[in-house]
Image: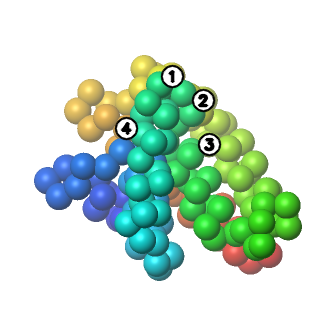
Amino acid sequence: MEQYIRKYRNRNHFDLSCSETIIYAANEKYTLGLSESHFKMMAPFSGGMYEKETCGIVTGAIAVLGIMFTKENSHNSPALQEAVIEYKTRFKEMLGSRVCKTLIETQADEIVGCDDLIVRGGILLQDVIEKYEKL
C-alpha cells in the first residue's frame, strides 16, 4: 500500500487530499475498478470535511472497507462492521486522535504535511483488509 500512497502523494503528478489518496491507492492495489464518480465522492471528506474534523485518512479507509466488505447492505455485513470499528480503534491508538486538526497540529511535518500519516494509515488499512479478507 505504501508504494501506491507515495505515488498518489507525488505533487508533481497529483494534487490529492488525504481521503482521495487513500481511495486512489486502494483502487490500484486491490483492483477495485472504481470510476471517476467514485473518486469524486471522496472529495468532500478532504481536510476533515473542510472543517478539520474527522481525518480524511479515516474516512477514505472506511470508504475502502465499505467497497470491499459490504454484502447487500451494511446491516448484512458483519465483517464490514468489525473491520470499520477495528480500523478506527487502531488508528486512534496509533496516532492518538482521529481529528484532522489535532493530527495536523501534533504530527504533520512542515515540509511533507500529512504524507507519513497517510502512509501509516494506509498500512493499517492493508493490515485490516488482510485480516478480514480471510473471514
Q: Residue at x 52, y 51 (%)?
A: 60
Residue 80 placement: quadrant: bottom right
Q: Which mark is residue 94?
A: none
Q: Which mark is residue 91?
A: 3
User: Does dot 4 land on a helix, a strand or a loop?
Assistant: loop
x, y (%) of residue 119? Answer: 43, 51
Residue 118 as seen in the image, left or right of residue 55: left
Residue type at the position of mark 2: Ser
Q: Of the residues under marks 4 and 3, which one precedes in the sequence?
A: 3
Q: Of the residues under marks 4 and 1, which one precedes in the sequence?
A: 1
User: Does dot 3 land on a helix, a strand or a loop?
Assistant: helix
User: Residue pushed farthest front?
Assistant: 37
Q: Which mark is residue 114?
A: 4
Residue type at the position of mark 4: Cys
Residue type at the position of mark 3: Phe
Residue sitting nearer the eye, 130 or 58: 58
Q: Residue at x 75, y 48 (%)?
A: 85
Is mark 1 in CB contact (under 8 Å) with mark 2?
Answer: yes
The quadrant of the rendering that contains the C terminus is bottom right
Q: Of the residues under marks 4 and 2, which one precedes in the sequence?
A: 2
Q: Which mark is residue 97?
A: 2
User: Does dot 2 land on a helix, a strand or a loop?
Assistant: loop
Is mark 2 in CB contact (under 8 Å) with mark 3?
Answer: no
Which residue carries the number 1 mark? 102
Q: Of the residues under marks 1 and 3, which one precedes in the sequence?
A: 3
Residue sitting nearer the eye, 25 or 15: 15
